[in-house]
Image: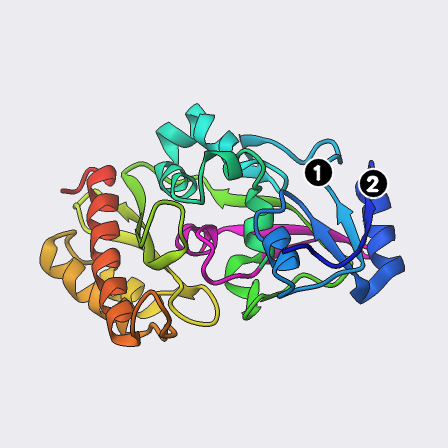
Amino acid sequence: MIPAAFDYHAPGSLEDAIALLEQHGDEAKVLSGGQSLLPLLKLRLGWATQLVDIGRIPGLEYIKEEDGYLKIGGNTREAALERSDLIRTKYPILLDTTLVIADPVVRNRATVGGNLAHGDPANDHPATMLALGAELVAVGPKGQRTIPITEFFKGLFETALAPSEILTEIRVPSPPPRSGGAYRKLERKVGDYATAAAAAQLTLGKNGKIEVAGIGLTNAGPVPLKGTEAEKFLVGKAPDEKTFAEAARLAARAASPTADWRGSVEYKREMARVMTGRALAAAAQRAGGM
């Protein structure tokens, strides 16, 4: 398919990009890596007469630890996560996530910020960021603000970003010792959207019990789903198979997937349970608990 005609803008600064978004209003879309937006335009499932490409704005691609956070620039490519020793050694849940997104060619262009800002519950980073308790930094005409990930996803393809705001940074709290996380995904073929997927992040106390738990589900409803009930259940429990089985059941019970060619509602909910159990087991192992 060929997209409808649009004007292309490549501003050199964040200020210029925001000014363009203000000027064109609903006619404009932010183009980051294009992983999600370009297929929508080509299939004419979405439209824009003005594309504001933020890919040439300097200073938005980085991975660093600072002030108690892992900070990822909004324009950081998925491939950069793959190559990062910091991600590989300290944040393997993010490596799990990026490695199941599309294919290497796409990951060379796709950005972490774009994956989140698109607001697609089928994208992989939202669930992982929910499990990690991330914060998102947005910049717009009124300045900068920080949005908790739990307040970011408002509906299907709808986020808390204002029309003229740009997601510039993702902040993940640096995990304390005895922490581990994992992302597990069921897909029909390599690079496909998830039939079901789950992210889990655990921190164990000195007594070996779970002190902090984070769970996020992909493609489990109209928005990325946080497994709040399961998280509460896990705190204070031993990280064993029985505990994880019940937590996985609770997480899947909260899911409300849609039936499609990937499976029925019942099948997807059951696979959400299975993926949650696997993610929890892997997270506990990485935390040193199993």
Quarter location, residue 61:
top right
Can I make out residue 144 in this image?
no
- From the top left corner, tell me how far across and down residue 104 is, in percent: 46, 34
Q: Position of residue 130 (x, y in %)?
A: 44, 56
The residue at 61%/60% (across/down) is: 43
Label 1, secondary structure: give it: loop
Q: Does the magenta stretch include residue 219?
A: no
Q: Quadrant of residue 179?
A: top left
Asked if the residues shown at circle 1 and circle 2 are in contact, with their CB atoms under 8 angstroms apart, the answer is no
Residue 211 in the image: above or below residue 249: above
CA distance separating discs 1 and 2: 9 Å
The residue depicted at 87 percent of the width and 52 percent of the height is: 19
Magenta stretch: residue 142 in it? Answer: yes
Q: Which of marks 1 and 2 is nearer the N terminus?
A: 2
For badge 1, the amino acid type reads Gly
Residue ID for mark 2: 11
Q: Which amino acid does label 2 sit on?
A: Pro
Residue 18: give x, y in percent of width and height.
82, 51
Residue located beneath label 1 in the image:
55
Give, as a single range, the part of the protein colored magenta: 119-147
Q: Quadrant of residue 89?
A: top left
221 or 152: nearer the viewer = 221
Nearest the camera: 206 or 132? Answer: 132
Q: Tell me: 42 left or right of 171.
A: right
